[in-house]
Every structure is written in C-alpha cells, then in structure tokens.
Image (tube, coloured by chain):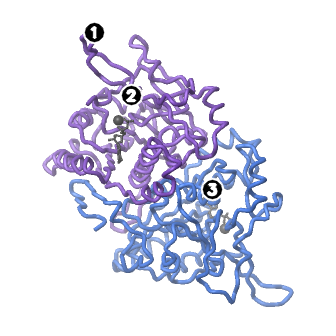
Chain colours: A blue, B purple
Amino acid sequence: DVIPRNLPNDHISHYDLNKLASTPMAAYNQERVLILSPMSRFYDEYWANLLKLTYPRELIELGFIVPRTADGDVALKKLEKAVKLVQSPRNSKEAKFAKITILRQDNESLQSQKEKDRHALSVQKERRANMALARNSLLFTTIGPYTSWVLWLDADIVETPNTLIQDLAGHDKPVISANCYQRYFDDEKKEDSIRPYDFNNWVESDEGLRIASTMSDDDIIVEGYHDIATYRPLMAHFYDPNGDVNTEMQLDGVGGAAVMVKADVHRDGAMFPSFPFYHLIETEGFAKMAKRLGYEVFGLPNYLVFHFNE
Amino acid sequence: DVIPRNLPNDHISHYDLNKLASTPMAAYNQERVLILSPMSRFYDEYWANLLKLTYPRELIELGFIVPRTADGDVALKKLEKAVKLVQSPRNSKEAKFAKITILRQDNESLQSQKEKDRHALSVQKERRANMALARNSLLFTTIGPYTSWVLWLDADIVETPNTLIQDLAGHDKPVISANCYQRYFDDEKKEDSIRPYDFNNWVESDEGLRIASTMSDDDIIVEGYHDIATYRPLMAHFYDPNGDVNTEMQLDGVGGAAVMVKADVHRDGAMFPSFPFYHLIETEGFAKMAKRLGYEVFGLPNYLVFHFNE
Ligand SMILES: Nc1nc2c(ncn2[C@@H]2O[C@H](COP(=O)(O)OP(=O)(O)O)[C@@H](O)[C@H]2O)c(=O)[nH]1
Ligand SMILES: Nc1nc2c(ncn2[C@@H]2O[C@H](COP(=O)(O)OP(=O)(O)O)[C@@H](O)[C@H]2O)c(=O)[nH]1
Ligand SMILES: [Mn+2]
Ligand SMILES: [Mn+2]
C-alpha cells in the first residue's frame, strides 16, 4: 500500500516510495495520474476532450497555471466555470477529479530575468524560458508522494484518443511523447487534411552536436525554426498513416503537447531548465535532463494528438 | 491572501503565486516554512533543538526522507515515536506542526545508476548522487503552492540558535547558508572547543574554474577533500568569534547543514543535480543552479550551527 498510514487528524503522512509504481497496467493498479496544463487560453474542445478520457477520474488530479495577462484573466474565468461544473458536490465521486489545483503565475522572477538578459535573449528564448518557469512552478507544487504518472498536456490540444492515458502508460517508458499534428482545410485539394505541428520531438544529429560544440554557454538551439539547420530527424516527419500506432522511436528532445512521464523521473530531479542546459531549454532541456538522470526518452510517431487551429 | 478560495469539498484549490511572499518579517506575515531533513539516523539532540525553535509551529511543515537501510529502520521508528508525541491530538494547535510528511526512500533508480556507472563513479560521487536523489524526492513531493520558505536542515545538526528561522529569513536572501561547526574536546588544551565541519560552503576560485575547464562532462569536483586543490575560499575558515553574527558573504557552493531557500527559487526549478552540473553535484550543484536561475547565494560565516560529534 502506497499510503499506508495517513493520519489526517495528526497531520502526519507516511509514504513508501519503493511501493509506489508506474506500470503499464496503471488503471488496474489504481495509479494516480497528475495532468498538468499551462494555460494561456481556455478552449472548449480541450476541456471536452479531457472529460472524454476514460481513465478513472477519481485517480486523476489536474493542475493548471494561468499567466497574469488579459488572455489569462479570460482563461481563468472559463476554467473556473468548467471546473465548478464537473466538481459539483452533487456529482458522484466517480464523476469528479481527485483534486484540481489552479495556480496564478508569478511573473516577478521572469521580470528580473528579462531586465538582466534583455539584450542577450531573443524573443523565442524569453518565451521558452517563461514557459519553463511556469511548468516548474506547476510541477513542484502539485506532484505528491503518491503520484505515479505526470501527463503534460498543453491546453491547446483539442483532440486525443479517449484512451490517451492508458495508451501512453501502456508503453511503460520513463518519458513518452505523442506526435502533435493539426487539422486544417487544404485549399488546393479542397478537403480536410492534417499537417505536422510540433517540431520539438527530435533525435539528436551530428550537425546538432557540432553546432552545440561551437556555442557559448548561454546560447541555445531551438528546434523547428529555420535559422539553425541541425538536420535533426524530427518525429513530426515520421508519421505513417498506415504504420503501427504503437511504433516507438527514441528521442533526444520532446515538446510539451502530450508527454507522459513516470513521476520518479521528476522526483529524481528532472525539471524544465529556463537556462540553457546543453544549449537546450524548457521541454527540450527536460528531455536532456531526464537522459542525464539515466532515463530513456521515447516518442510515438504514429500516435497523433491534435493542436488547435485558430 | 495567498489561499483565496480553498474549497476542500470540491477538491479545488486556487493559489496566486504573485501574492505569495518570502519576506524578512516571515513570522509576522505568517509565512509557511517547510523544514526538510534527509535522515539516516535520528538524534535526540536534533529533535530537541527542532522543538526549541521559536518560529510559530503552526506555520511549520516538516518533511523527512529515510533510507531503506538497517540504520534507516531504526531512525524511522524513533522519528515516528517523536512525531506522534508532538502531534498528539491532545496537544493544542500551537503545539503541533502544520503537517509532517515521512518518505521512505526509493532506491531503485540509484541501483540502476550504480550498475551503469560503477566504474566511473567514485564512492563519494555515488554517495552524493544518492543524497541528491533523496533531497529531490523530498522536495518535489512536499513543497506546496503556499510554501514561502524551505529550510534544509540536516538531521545531524544538533544545535542552532532558537531563532534560526527568523534569523535566516531576516537576511532576505534567495539562498543563505549557516556556518556548520562541531563541538569537541581539545585533548591538548584539555578544554571544550569548536572546529569547522562543513566545507561545502565556498567561493569559486580561478584555480577551481581552471580545473573544471580541463575536465570531461562527467567529472566532478567535490570540495573538502584533498585530492583536488581548488584553493577555493571556504566559509568554514571565515568564522570570526568576535565578528558581527550578521556578516554576509557571497557563495558559489553550499552544503546542506542549514540552508534557507526562498521557495520561489525551488519553484523556478532549482534542484539538487545527481549528475555533474558544471562539475558539481548535490548541494554544491544546487547553488550553481540557483545562480543559473538568476539568484544570489549567501553564507553567514559567523552564524554557527553544530554538527553531531560521535
Ligand atoms: N502559464 C502559462 N501558460 C502559457 C503561456 N503561454 C502559453 N501558455 C500555454 O502553454 C502551452 C504551450 O504554449 P503555446 O504558446 O501554445 O506554444 P506552441 O503551441 O508551442 O506555440 C499552451 O497550453 C498555452 O496555453 C504563459 O505565458 N503562461
Ligand atoms: N534519506 C537519506 N538520508 C541520508 C542518507 N545518508 C545520509 N543521510 C542524511 O543526510 C544528511 C547528510 O548526510 P551525512 O552523511 O551526515 O553527510 P556529511 O555530514 O556531510 O558527511 C544527514 O541528515 C543524514 O542523516 C541516505 O542514504 N538517505
Ligand atoms: Mn500551442
Ligand atoms: Mn552529517
């Protein structure tokens, strides 16, 4: 038993981390999953998709972090409304999530960073560093001693298989990332189509390593932008509509769209560096950190989740 | 208000990180302090000292992580007994700590690391890496969205000023470390005396940087051992019995004896690297990471805490 003696009256909790497992039979073993979503906008489709997930809701905790912007204000209002509805005391235990935490983002530390590095940092680097700080605040304050899995799910992912949690856990990998695509209307062919969206899931290349070796400590490589040609194989391009949906590939960088992480990886210290870590930051730096901690990182090129299209 | 709308019935919690402060007037402002102690042995003197701290107990949470060893079994039993006594339902709210979490350490990830790196790692490196993993597990699972300060206090620190928390918080620094000494009987002078104990509080030196620059990615420098002469100024040697107890000095490495950290530093991502980070690991690597996150690290050379002497 993971929580052998929880004595709320005395405010003492005992946890045995050795008995806490993250297994391919997560639901059967009643493993707790923490879904974390940084959220600058609230999309009804994201919420509807979340409610359609078939993993037992009483084993799911949700964590959100909302920026202190006008967009964030609107998102927070919508999120609160949606949350109140599903967590209504009139709903059964099975219909409710185990716990929901909503954080309002602190922007002071970024401000100070901004001041310091304004000249050195490109806008992209600043944005990614900000996202890293938000992810870390969310992670550090919501992961519990009883958490088995952490699912990072961006708030603009509007469509996934209903069995997302079981599917990703089933691969039994320390870190595993879905392939993030986007639906769009192909104007030429006059038909609905899909296209790759997230280019942060990649395999390191010799050229990527060579470029990194010439860089100074504070430089970063951000994948998916064309100013630096790393020739890294991008998982987005490995999608095969006729291939096995369970095909796995080893990755060196991941994006944040839909990534399942065994909680022990985070508990060992894997976080989202806001500073260049091997010239990588945020989710890409997280993948590198997981690897430095001795864990393997995987992706599922044929397992698609879909990003909102505005 | 930091916890504006805590709706336990609906399992929804809102937290505004911007309203969460870590100020020099911590007790007056009712700031929550999390005291974290990795514990391989339970010392009555450590516990007695903890109970003598004058910071309001209802604002203090405690977190322990106990290794899965024979020593750990004994420590756990003693700790549980001590905890039950102070948290007794018959005690007033003021006499009890706000929350106590006891973790039993997971040793699987270290095992796997051990297997992999057995040849490369010296015993010291393995021990420090293990400690880093233990500290991270403890940190990630106990820090809450309402935590203002984290006090790292080793379980073999048997004597501190009663005002330890107020004193360290009063300096209003992101990270501040006390000077860790040890009482002993001077056989020559036939009198009680004190001597430096923890050499992990240090200032980087040109020679330290030079040595690091010649090292491979996986090499580490561990301060306080004489196989590598870094000529780093060690805070342990800056103690002046006649000096101002409030004297501050900037540090580049810290030990874990008694270190106060503003919770935002951890929330931004500062953890204890178990892998070489700028050739540093554990508490020394943590100091470097805090600096990479833009925070300053300080020590108090004339403010002593005392390590157990067996
Ligand atoms: N907390 C927080 N979330 C943000 C911020 N900016 C974007 N997000 C969210 O973080 C996720 C990824 O950001 P997004 O801008 O969509 O990145 P992209 O899709 O990779 O271009 C989405 O869930 C956003 O809603 C921010 O400043 N703070
Ligand atoms: N959880 C855990 N704590 C440990 C372990 N080894 C030592 N400790 C604790 O960690 C702190 C520092 O360890 P210690 O061996 O005293 O280091 P030193 O004083 O720097 O030589 C003390 O509070 C110990 O009780 C371990 O394997 N696991
Ligand atoms: Mn997006
Ligand atoms: Mn010690």
Farthest front residue in view: B119
Mark 1 against mark 2, which lies toward the viewer? 1
The residue depicted at 64 percent of the width and 67 percent of the height is: A251
The amino acid sitting under disc 3 is Gly
The residue depicted at 46 percent of the width and 47 percent of the height is: B129
The quadrant where residue A301 appears:
bottom right
The quadrant where residue A72 appears:
bottom right
If you read the primary sequence from the N terminus, does the residue marked by circle 1 or circle 2 appear first?
2
Marks 1 and 3, how far apart in space?
55 Å
Q: Specify whether disc 2 shares its chain with disc 3.
A: no
Q: Secondary structure at mark 1?
A: loop
The numbered mark 2 sits on a residue in which chain?
A: B
Relative to residue B198, is residue B91 drawn left or right?
left
The answer to whether the residue bearing label 3 lies less than 8 angstroms from the nearest atom of ligand 1 is no
In percent of width and height, residue A168 lies at 52, 76
The answer to whether the residue bearing label 1 lies less than 8 angstroms from the nearest atom of ligand 2 is no
Task: Write down the residue under mark 2.
Answer: B167
Q: Specify whether disc 1 shares its chain with disc 2.
A: yes
Task: Write down the residue under mark 1.
Answer: B189
Farthest left residue in view: B90
